[in-house]
Image: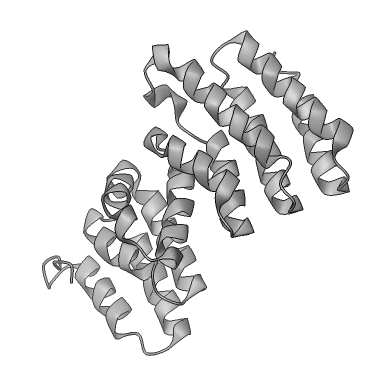
Amino acid sequence: MADFPPPNSAVYACIQAVRSADSAAKLVQAVRQLSLCESPEAIPTLIEVLGFNNPGAAVAAVDGLVRLGDVAAEALFQQLDDYNYTARAWALRALALLGDPRALDLLCETAQGDFSLSVRRAAARGLGGIKWEKIPENDRLNAQEKALETLILAAQDPEWVVRYGAVAGTAALGEQAADPSLFQAVQTALEGVLATEIDAVVKARAQWAIETLMHWG
């Protein structure tokens, strides 16, 4: 059990509300309130909620972790290998939204190999949202090339929602391309999706991405 903050604090009261919730709806509401505290002291409880069988509470916990930024990412990395699948899947979604570059390899692996389409989609989108400025400039291009290779594969996923996420991730990567060659590779990848994609929604997203990136080139 995680250590509690001081008993007279608002965070303590919110944690207690999470622990005493006696229905799914009350748990969701309690986790939302805890997330809004934006306190590092809430992190252990928010991470614990990721393993509950309550998707609404997990979504609220992810939101709270993302609000806390780097300190939450550090805690997630420390515990990731100890999670059951449900908690790990939600933790991956949080890491994807946080954009921590240390998650690059994990997101690449997940986008290609996880059995859950929603987790693959989150990982693919997350590859486009990595905070590349946190990677040393000399290493940035190699990291972005690795992300693009994965996104190209994810754009061929059997599930259209994963392909859509891959297109969105590819477009976001293009906006932060480390050099002109990568920017061109992104454009080529998106044009390939436009030429081969059969789903109208994914095709439209690729078209929009191409048109948007024209203003970045």
Residue 140: x and y in percent read 45, 18
Q: Which residue is at the front of the view, 102 or 27?
A: 102
Q: Is residue 37 visible?
A: yes
Residue at the (57%, 49%) spot, across then down: 113
Residue at the (39%, 23%) spot, across then down: 135
Q: Which residue is at the front of the view, 39 or 3?
A: 3
Residue 77: x and y in percent read 31, 47
Query: Does 139 appear above or below 98?
Result: above
Residue at the (57%, 34%) spot, across then down: 128
Quadrant for the C terminus in the image: top right
Quadrant for the N terminus in the image: bottom left
Q: Which residue is at the front of the view, 66 or 55?
A: 55
Query: Does 80 appear above or below 109?
Result: below
Residue 150: x and y in percent read 60, 34
The answer to whether residue 126 is left or right of residue 76 is: right
Q: Is residue 38 visible?
A: no
Residue 87 image-quadrant placement: bottom left
Residue at the (14%, 65%) spot, across then down: 5
Residue 186 image-quadrant placement: top right
Residue 130: x and y in percent read 48, 34
Q: Which residue is at the front of the view, 157 or 36?
A: 157
The answer to whether residue 50 is left or right of residue 190 is: left
